[in-house]
Image (spheres, rainbow, N blue to C red):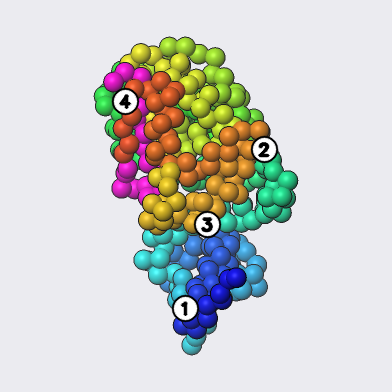
Amino acid sequence: MTTMLPIDPAEAAAFADRMLDILNGGALALMISIGHRAGLFDVMSRLGFATSVVIADEAGLRERYVREWLGAMATSAIVEYDAAGDAYRLPRSHAAALTRAARPNNLATTAQWISLLGSVEDAVLECFARGGGVPYAAYARFHEVMAEGSDQTVVAALEGAILPLVEGGVAALERGIDVLDVGCGSGRAVNQMAGAFPRSRFTGYDLSPEAIATARAEARERGLSNARFEVRDVADLGATDAFDLVTAFDAIHDQARPATVLAAIARALRRDGTLLMQEVRGTSCVDDDAAHPLAPFLYTVSCLHCMTVSLSAGGAGLGAMWGAATARRMLEEAGFAKVRIETLAHDVLNSYYIARKQG
């Protein structure tokens, strides 16, 4: 027989207060996403105190909607409100985390995930009962949101921080090598590297025709003759000893067959080649993951996207939080004898794996 212990009133009240914070935070994430997409933060960063009419005119938007949005921003102290002048201002210290000019520190881009994931809530909930998963096609803005995130964490830091993690990598790229980006998405990283290292040859593979079309269009616009893109299932690269460097930015954990993909990468690399892999900074242990400042957010993204898209294809459902211990084991099983894990100051979300077939 279970004995029911009395509820601690102070503890219950404290948790209720926390729930109110959670509800406000969830609502604000939606409004921050709208502010980002509508360009409102960018407009306000150029103004001082301004009325809703002025802000709406500057943004080319309807004042009534802007005024209600400003209500959410003002009551949450994201923007300042001058009651006497009925005017609003975005403090410079807040603009440093909310505007496109703040790249790579614009957290408003990340807020878009909340509305994107909310759009598949019903479909994922069905999977809780019947199993299976929700396919990529259900996520209408996935590649757009991913491209913005990649632009901040990857593209903006490629030459200055990420590529130098590979010993001798930058010098080799300058001389000219063969590079493959697995799960290239909209191709921003490939096109950035192709522009920076014209003597090297770059290939991007992704399963999405839409993303590949975007990548090719950018390459044409930039006149990049050393970048090519192909719609391809990266579990079957069809290559042996073909590349000197393979990159995989936030791509492996989504795969239906991640172990097969890693083994295919190992085969595709030349003997002295390197895999440079960016993955979410998990530990493979929930207790330890609790120390990550964005752990609840990352597990939510994993449940409502990364894990379920893999399961939808009959895959492993590895999930974004597979973590360092699991990743290291899988890399070793795939044929990588030497694995090093690094973190970078600009990227609180991810770890970077530098893996080689030779020890």
Q: Residues within 10 Å of mark 4 (few under 14, many from 20)?
A: some
Q: Which residue is mark 3?
A: 111
Q: Which residue is mark 2?
A: 312
- Visible residue check, residue 84: yes
Q: Are marks 3 and 1 in contact (CB under 8 Å)?
A: no
Q: Which residue is mark 1?
A: 11
- Sequence-wise, the earlier of marks 4 and 3 is 3
CA–CA distance between discs 4 and 1? 49 Å
Q: Which residue is mark 4?
A: 338
Instruction: Point out the stretch of residues depicted in magenta.
Output: 343-359
- Sequence-wise, the earlier of marks 3 and 1 is 1
Q: Residues within 10 Å of mark 1 (few under 14, many from 20)?
A: few
Image position of 265 with respect to 302: above or below: above
Query: Mark 4 belongs to which amino acid?
Result: Lys
Measured as percent of width and height from the top left, residue 152 is found at: 43, 46
- Visible residue check, residue 195: no
Q: Would you say residue 48 sits in the magenta stretch?
A: no
CA–CA distance between discs 3 and 1? 30 Å
**Dot 1 lies on which element?**
helix
Comparing 167 with 46, the one in front is 167
Choose mark 2 or mark 1, whichever is in front: 1
Choose mark 4 or mark 1, whichever is in front: 1
Residue beneath the point at 50% across and 55% down: 297
CA–CA distance between discs 4 and 3? 36 Å
CA–CA distance between discs 2 and 1? 41 Å
Measured as percent of width and height from the top left, residue 103 is found at: 41, 50
Q: Is residue 322 left or right of residue 244?
A: right
- Sequence-wise, the earlier of marks 2 and 4 is 2
Q: Would you say residue 346 sits in the magenta stretch?
A: yes
Residue beneath the point at 32% across and 43% down: 343
